Image (spheres, rainbow, N blue to C red):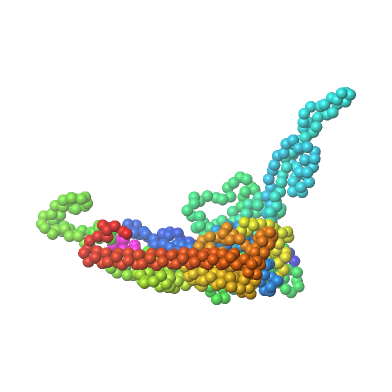
Amino acid sequence: MNDSDFHSLVRNEIEQAVNFHDSEYAADRIEALDYYLGNPLGNEIDGRSKLVQTEVSDVIESIKPSLLKIFTATDDFVKFEPRGPEDVEAAKQATEYVNYILNADNEGFTILANWFTDALLFKMGVVKHVFDESKAVAEDVYEGLTGDELTLLLSDDEVDVVEQEEVEYGEEVISQDGSITPPPIVYNVRVRKTHRDGRIRIENVPPEEFLFNQKAKSLDDCRFVAHRTTMTVSDLVSLGYDRNVVESHVGASELDMLNEKQQRFETLESSAENTTSDISQRDVLVTEAYIKADYDDDGISEIRRVVALGSSYEVVDNESYHMMPFSVISPILMPHRMVGRSIAEMLIDLQQSKTAIVRQLHDNIYFQNNARVGAVEGQVNLDDLMSNRPGGIVRMRAPGMVQPLVPPPVADSAFPLLAYMDQVREMRTGISKASLGLDPDALQSATASAVSATVSAAQSKIEMIARTFAETGVKRLMKCILQLVQKHQQQPRIIRLRNKFVTMDPAAWENEFDIIVNVGLGNSDQAQRAAALAQIASKQEQILLQMGIDNPLCSLAQYRNTLVKMLESSGFKNGGDFFLDPANLPPDVQQRFQQKMAQAGQGDNAVERMKVEAEIALAREKMMAELQLKREELEMKMAIRKQEMEFEAQLRGLEAATGANISTNIPRV
């Protein structure tokens, strides 16, 4: 395939994808954003209520905390499992390094939050992950350098001299024999330094900037994907593209005119974005496409990375690539389609209906408080009637000449209808008062376990969304990060993990790993996990005491892991602040410990062993007592809350029966 045919193929794929997305998804995303922001519906009437319900925003913002808590509860929510015994250490390092790249090299929490929001609102969320070999250029000035210092400075290949000045430093020296030594020469230089840094960059891609071919089932099935965005002339030139070619494509693009982009920034003052006089800061339309094509005519398609500039899609870069560097998620999967359904589209009709009902309810109350009046013509002073002031007098020739025309109240029929729509919303999304812990009727249970069961059942759909995100998008994201570091990181890198500096060398990870996404689903509540860990610790202590350190069931390292997990369940992330790691003890400490344990094993120091046993038993009893105390406190709080809600229910019954508001006169306990 020659370059001309290939460029025509790329241009055709881009244009088809743009037309497909504009017709298939653009209008839906604009509508979803309008409802999320609570914008007017367009059917407002002057003089009537214009209130807008925010059902879409309320539900999405209620789902996000649960999702983010699931994925960010631990620092290693994605794990790589070894395929063989020889891969155990490599899999552990890969797990630590990939999670470090997401959370330390990139803003992991922000990326996940924006990713999930896009998916819940716009049907799909997209992140891009590439190895960024960026470089930054800065100028520095050095004064008074000697010749040796200047030579050392210029030995760096990344340093270029911009200006150089030789200056005499001091005065000439006349020796006793009359010879003259000239003053030494120093150098003032201005240099330009280029700082290169290779890191994996993860960024959220706005849905309107992501393109793919029609009828794609998944990213692995796509023959074409692209990221269509804008970059400044300066950024493109710094990446190595020809300045004249880049500047020839400067100008407003159809991407700037997209209704989706304008809708996103509608709250900001509108102005032209390409009005700067500095051409280096002007925007250029850039389409970074990844296309499967038989470029080398061997009958097998391979992935090509193509960079095209401007609306004419002039190809300025074309190279072979090893993956589609994107990860896509949808909250509700549609079989055989890459883009599923969103939470927003399930709520738009409910928001419309609830808005209409609440508006009519407001109008009804307004008309009741400001009812129209019927007056017998000629029997009433209309000027008095139209002067609506407190205590005003309306002159009538006979009684009953003025009658208010009060509309019937609609609240009795409106509120049950609103409650029904809340039930429909709960069935569709799983979000209810019970799932948020706000429904006193659902939470008036006799035991804490019943409350937990009610909340867990209400959260099943949220957990389904979390599992979908984990298995479709998050797993692919982490796998691609691992592939990128194995391919591009040529030198070992030293990073800090758990207050230790660790060397990460992906070149030593020869094998692929299985990926387990640990998103915290299917676990018990925190109190139950703490109780289970306490039982495990008790069994481990018995094994260590009865069978010794060299027993075949439990090691000191495993016992420490249990203690660390108990700390993590209590909110303490760094177990190293409380317990040493037996594998990382200094050699002299390890030797003394082994000698001590050997003496205890031979029975030479029975008193010391009994002391150790007593200390372990005391620690276990103390921990069990603390767990029991926390459990009793939780049950007491639940009992008090139950009594409060029962008392409040009795007060509401009294108020309904008597018509008096007595709850405000009673202090809350």
Quadrant of the image containing the C terminus:
bottom left
Q: Nearer the viewer, residue 194 or 38?
A: 194
Q: Quadrant of residue 437?
A: bottom left
The question of residue 361 being in magenta is answered with yes
Q: Nearer the viewer, residue 11 or 640?
A: 640
Q: Position of residue 175 (x, y in %)?
A: 86, 25
Q: Position of residue 118 (x, y in %)?
A: 52, 63
Q: Nearer the viewer, residue 293 or 429?
A: 429
User: In percent of the image, x 66 and y 60: which residue is there?
Assistant: 589
User: In percent of the image, x 13 and y 56: which residue is there?
Assistant: 379
User: In percent of the image, x 66 and y 57: which residue is there?
Assistant: 501
- Left or right of 521? Residue 13 is right
- Left or right of 544? Residue 663 is left
Magenta stretch in the rendered image: 358-364
The question of residue 158 being in magenta is answered with no
Q: Is residue 241 above or below residue 319?
A: above
Does the image show residue 18?
A: no
Does the image show residue 635?
A: yes
User: In percent of the image, x 76 and y 37: which residue is there?
Assistant: 145
Q: Is residue 167 above or below residue 299?
A: above
- Left or right of 224? Residue 207 is left
Q: Position of residue 500 (x, y in %)?
A: 64, 57
- Left or right of 407? Residue 152 is right
Q: Position of residue 170 (x, y in %)?
A: 77, 29
Dominant SS type (magenta)? helix
Q: Nearer the viewer, residue 28 or 238?
A: 238
